[in-house]
């Protein structure tokens, strides 16, 4: 710990916290478990920031990586290619919604969103529509922490400091179902809130490149959720107004919402789909943007026309990362994971159901293998706790003492576990969460 604190600056952390909040150095991982240097084990309920799908040190992914290491570790992807990236691209084209035919690789989620934003803008520019320079986003959205991705996000905690550096997006109210009126369904909320999106598109379509959304769950935005019907309406409206649709499935893709991709639940194909996190099973950084052939064609011309998309990263399409992704897709296929997850999602729902009646829980919400519990000061009118009280931190600390890794987002506790978790382990996490919430709201 002391060696760490003398040289490291940790992500998303106020480092002064570690004067009183001990770091947890991890020695090894196995399945859903992480083990520290004292032999304590922690059940990884958040998949190590939502990336780990099939457990730590998964034997099948390990074997694939070991084999790839003996063949090729990396090669430039400009002018060269390799088997893992071709095979991965072919499989992603088959698995993603219809019409997504071309794969452009980057290193991480933020980079993928940057690619999609630039590609959308550049497409319109290549077509001579140079007035299209803006993007529409939803309130409470999060798309990454580079400058362009912060600009199209709307979580103040991450964005407000850097506001002077950012391009100005058009923000419309989220279809977040937490805000529903008494007796109103989530589908009805989606229809009511879509009026704002329709108005923004009608007013700004001639200057807008694309609408960007996180399908179904605004993950970093307190795990707020909405109905798939909103996406159906959005696809139709984007087509009607001549605006691209970017689906940021970085956090929600690969089974997190109950289907392989969240867009499937709305029956839509976006113009750009951004994937990362679970893509490699939590092993290595890799992201990809899939898009349609008509967009690809807008860049396909003689070199002298200067229409090429020149975005690049040194480790684009890294063979090791691609091989880990292929092994991950193999597990999905061979183990019928999406079907198996339906049973696990039901266990999650049942195990946390008693929390719905907790006097300081406003809502327990769920899409597939993602479940969130929102703590509030007053249940009747959903008055939130002040963020300064850091109630979620108390849940985190209690969970560590009980051998679990829960990392609430403010006042929202959530489960997003690896898919190799057992029903018994889910019940254990629900118990730990309940205990932690009781302690967090006790004063």
Image (cartoon, rainbow, N blue to C red):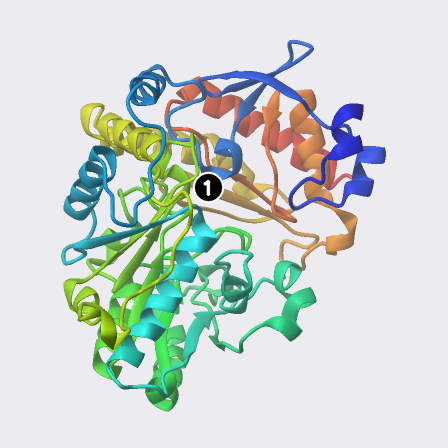
Residue 312 x %, y % = 39, 55
Left or right? Give the position of 223 relative to 26.
left
What is the count of numbered marks? Answer: 1
Which residue is found at the position 44% from the left and 50% from the top?
109
Write the residue at 51% across / 30% down: 45
Q: Residue furthest top?
A: 39
Residue drawn at the location 73% of the way across and 42% of the way down? 441
Q: Position of residue 1 (x, y in %)?
A: 76, 24
Q: Compare residues 147 and 421 and report the one nearer the observer.
A: 147
Q: Residue furthest right?
A: 19
Relative to residue 339, is residue 319 drawn left or right?
Answer: right
Can residue 217 be seen by looking at this rendering? no
Residue at 36% in and 71% down = 211
The residue carrying pointer 1 sits among few (fewer than 14), some (14 to 19) or many (20 or more) residues within 10 Å by Cα, namely: many
Q: Nearer the viewer, residue 349 or 336?
A: 336
- Residue 307 falls in which quadrant of the image? bottom left
Kindly indicate the quadrant of the structure image that contains residue 331.
Answer: top left
Q: Please tell me whether mark 1 sits on a helix, a strand or a loop.
A: strand
* Residue 422 location (% of width, % of height): 40, 20
Instruction: Pick out the residue farthest to the front.
Output: 304
Q: Which residue lies under the disc numbered 1? A: 371
**Which quadrant holds residue 87?**
top left
Q: Position of residue 298 (x, y in %)?
A: 20, 72
Q: Compared to 185, does 71 lie above or below?
A: above
Residue 318 in sight = yes
Q: Is residue 272 above or below residue 105?
A: below
Quadrant where the C terminus sits is top right
Left or right: where 305 falls relative to 43: left
The relative height of residue 268 versus residue 363 in the rendered view (above or below) is: below
Q: Is residue 131 above or below residue 115?
A: below
């Amino acid at each position: 710990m002391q060696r760490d604190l003398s040289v490291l600056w940790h992500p998303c952390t106020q480092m002064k916290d570690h004067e009183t909040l001990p770091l947890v150095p991890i020695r090894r991982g196995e399945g859903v478990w992480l083990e520290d240097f004292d032999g304590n084990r922690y059940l990884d309920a958040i998949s190590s920031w939502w990336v780990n799908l099939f457990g730590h040190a998964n034997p099948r992914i390990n074997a694939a990586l070991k084999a790839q290491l003996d063949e090729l570790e990396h090669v430039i992807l400009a002018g060269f290619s390799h088997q893992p990236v071709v095979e991965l691209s072919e499989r992603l084209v088959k698995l993603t919604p219809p019409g997504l035919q071309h794969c452009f690789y980057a290193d991480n989620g933020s980079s993928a969103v940057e690619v999609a934003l630039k590609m959308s803008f550049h497409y319109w520019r290549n077509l001579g529509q140079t007035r299209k320079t803006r993007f529409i986003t939803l309130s409470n959205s999060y798309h990454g922490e580079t400058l362009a991705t912060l600009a199209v996000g709307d979580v103040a905690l991450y964005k407000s400091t850097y506001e002077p550096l950012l391009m100005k997006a058009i923000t419309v109210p989220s279809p977040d179902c937490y805000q529903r009126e008494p007796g109103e369904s989530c589908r009805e909320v989606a229809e009511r809130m879509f009026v704002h999106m329709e108005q923004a598109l009608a007013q700004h379509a001639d200057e807008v490149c694309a609408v960007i959304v996180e399908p179904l769950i605004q993950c970093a935005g307190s795990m707020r959720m909405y109905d798939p019907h909103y996406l159906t309406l959005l696809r139709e409206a984007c087509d009607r107004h001549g605006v691209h649709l970017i689906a940021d499935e970085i956090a929600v893709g690969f089974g997190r919402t109950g289907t392989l991709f969240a867009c499937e639940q709305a029956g839509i194909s976006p113009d750009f789909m951004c994937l990362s996190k679970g893509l490699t099973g939590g092993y290595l950084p890799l992201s990809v943007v899939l898009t349609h052939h008509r967009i690809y064609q807008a860049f396909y011309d003689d070199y002298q026309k200067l229409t090429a998309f020149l975005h690049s990263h040194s480790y684009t399409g890294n063979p090791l990362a691609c091989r880990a992704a292929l092994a991950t897709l193999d597990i999905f296929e061979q183990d019928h994971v999406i079907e198996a997850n339906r049973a696990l999602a039901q266990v999650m729902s049942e195990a946390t159901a008693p929390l719905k009646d907790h006097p300081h829980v406003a809502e327990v919400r769920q899409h597939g293998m993602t479940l969130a519990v929102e703590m509030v000061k007053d249940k009747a009118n959903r008055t939130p706790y002040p963020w300064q009280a850091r109630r979620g931190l108390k849940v985190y600390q209690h969970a560590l003492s009980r051998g679990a890794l829960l990392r609430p987002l403010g006042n929202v506790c959530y489960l997003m576990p690896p898919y190799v978790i057992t029903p018994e382990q889910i019940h254990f996490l629900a118990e730990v969460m309940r205990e932690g919430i009781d302690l967090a709201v006790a004063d």
